[in-house]
Image: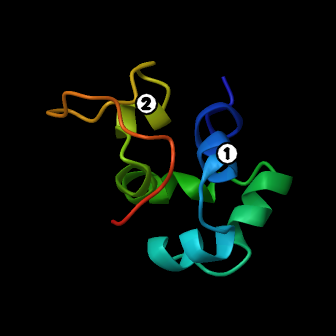
Amino acid sequence: MDIYQERIRPLFDGASETNAEIERRLGITPKTINKWNKTSLKSYTKFIPQIAAYFHVSTDYLLGNTDDPTPAGQKEKPPAQGGEL
């Protein structure tokens, strides 16, 4: 399973904010998401906790350990769009 292509990229693609805004909120340098989309760089792995918090999904979901995106302790599945950290 390509974790980035199957779990993380769809979240970025479906977000209501631009990649530049998401990068700013996550504290990553400009054009980083673009680089992740175009290459097999795995530098996104150190941002898994921030990405999970931004999109209101569990880190286990992003890592492919579960198919349930619901964070621990949350009853309802989160919306697919990003939000405040």
Give the labeled residue for mark 2: 61
**Residue 49 place in picture, x, y as percent:** 37, 53
- Considering every residue shown, the one lying at the far top of the view is 67
Q: Quadrant of the C terminus?
A: bottom left
Q: Residue at the spot x=61%, y=59% of the render?
A: 43
Tell me residue 71's x, y (percent): 27, 36
Quadrant including the N terminus: top right
Q: Relative to 80, does residue 37 appear above or below in the rendering?
A: below
* Numbered disc total: 2
Residue at x 66% of width, y 69% of height = 18
The residue at the point 69 percent across, 63 percent down is 33
Q: Foreground: 41 or 69?
A: 69
* Type of amino acid at the residue the image marks with label 1: Arg
Q: Amino acid at mark 2?
A: Tyr
Query: Could you say where residue 61 lies in the image, as x and y percent from the top left?
Result: 43, 30
User: In which quarter of the view is residue 53 placed?
Assistant: bottom left
Using the rendered view, name the quadrant where residue 70 is placed. Answer: top left
Residue 44 horizontal side relative to residue 68, left or right: right
Q: Is residue 70 above or below residue 80?
A: above
